[in-house]
Image (cartoon, rainbow, N blue to C red):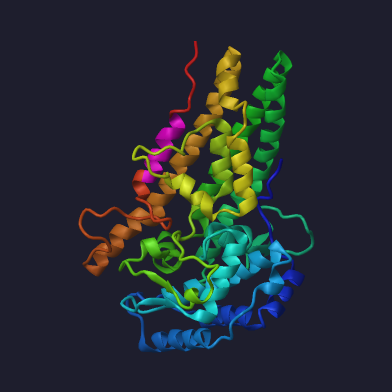
Amino acid sequence: MSIRILVSCHPRHLWHVYRLLGNRGEKILDAAVAARLQLGDKLGITEEEKATSESWRVNVRRMPLLSSTKLQSSRILLRRAHLVLAYIMHFYIQSLPPDAPVIIPRPLALPVLRISASLDIPPLLTFSDTVLYNWTHRHPSTSVPAIDNLRIRTLFSGLIDEEEFYLSSARIELRGVKALELMRSTMDEVFIRDKTAVCRITGYLQAMTRIINELKVLLMDVRRMCRPEQYYNEVRPWFRGEDSDTNGRKWVFEGIEEDPSLKTPTELSGPSAGQSSLIHVLDVFLGIDHQSSPSGKQSFMTRMQRYMPRNHRLFLDYLISNPQPLRIFVMSSGDDRLCATYNSAVLALKEFRDAHMIIATLYIVNPARRTAMLAKTRNQKDGQPLLGTGGTNLVKFLKDTRARTSAAMITYT
């Protein structure tokens, strides 16, 4: 019962994908990065920048149709191919003029659809692409990943701000591995259910609280090298999915009708922290309910699980189906010290979400207001809420998740 949180791609796998995609996929991505393509809706974009973007997009449209058949033998190769093609697709879409229709060319659309179907994830950039599969060692003297020895492989903007944004999440995921080990030990003790088990679970929850507090520190550390204005204006727009397109454009996958096995995508939200398996696992483990929705519709957190790697989703399903949940065990134990320790862990997660709200305000809400004032126009119609990259009402979602976390606290006497 484990889950690999942070997974890199060995150089030999990079070369294998490079070769199997006919050298074109990786070359096209490298060319986009080297050309420093600009956002199509960038204020003050020059004619030269527009021409550079169009010249690159022409090369994408002229690519030979890439075959994914030989990649099917390895999920590692499929994941790398998904990352490469998804980055190319976002470079292509977000560099388009804002009034141009979004038509993903056939040589790109068909392979990204087929590879995404093989991986059972949506055909666009995900949190896993930008964080879990997008790192390497800063100093390659060791094979073991460490928080202070990571760097990011692929960036849209080339800015240190973008790299630090990804690294902040990568460090959280890496530190979260210890939390998973504590969960396994805790679940073993819940099945035993004696006084010794209660004592041990209390100790595990104390350690869990310390780790969640460390995750909060790592989250807030993003402020050291990631500037809010640069992130909001030069990095974040590259993540946009169909449901956060400022002009409401629909994405058309050219050639999809040629392959009866392919279906028109219905999930096209950009990468979001809501797609982090680690945070979902913490919620499920502590018994925090984000699955239900007052409207009866699927909750945002549940929907975001579709964007996770399949083995991560299976692990979450395993936790959700656990016949002896931790929270129920704590409530029935009658042990005040255990209840207090459990509440401390829940409070730590609530404070993590407080920190998330601070970061969202600093990096999204405030810059959005300033950008609207500087442009003397609004990105949204009056009364329309600010959307996250996952397509949800950002502020309301963060407040709701924080409130649901607080509601998990246990009242005891």
Q: Is residue 118 left or right of residue 245?
A: right
Residue shown at 69%/50% (left/top)? 4
Whether 106 is drawn above or below 291: the answer is below
Quarter of the image for residue 401 reads top left
Q: Position of residue 227 (x, y in %)?
A: 45, 61
Whether 287 is drawn above or below 75: the answer is above
**How many numbered circles does the render carry?**
0
> Would residue 167 be visible to someone looking at this image?
yes
> Would residue 155 be visible to someone looking at this image?
no
Q: Position of residue 137 (x, y in %)?
A: 71, 62
Classify the position of the N terminus by image quarter: top right
Q: Is residue 141 left or right of residue 154?
A: right
Q: Main secondary structure of the magenta part?
A: helix
Q: Position of residue 405 (x, y in %)?
A: 46, 33
Residue shown at 50%/80% (left/top)? 106
Whether 170 is drawn above or below 206: the answer is below
Residue shown at 51%/64% (left/top)? 162
Q: Which residue is nearer to you in this view: 37 or 122? A: 122
**Which region is colored magenta?**
397-406
Q: Position of residue 32 (x, y in %)?
A: 53, 80
Q: Is residue 84 magenta?
A: no
Residue shown at 73%/75% (left/top)? 15
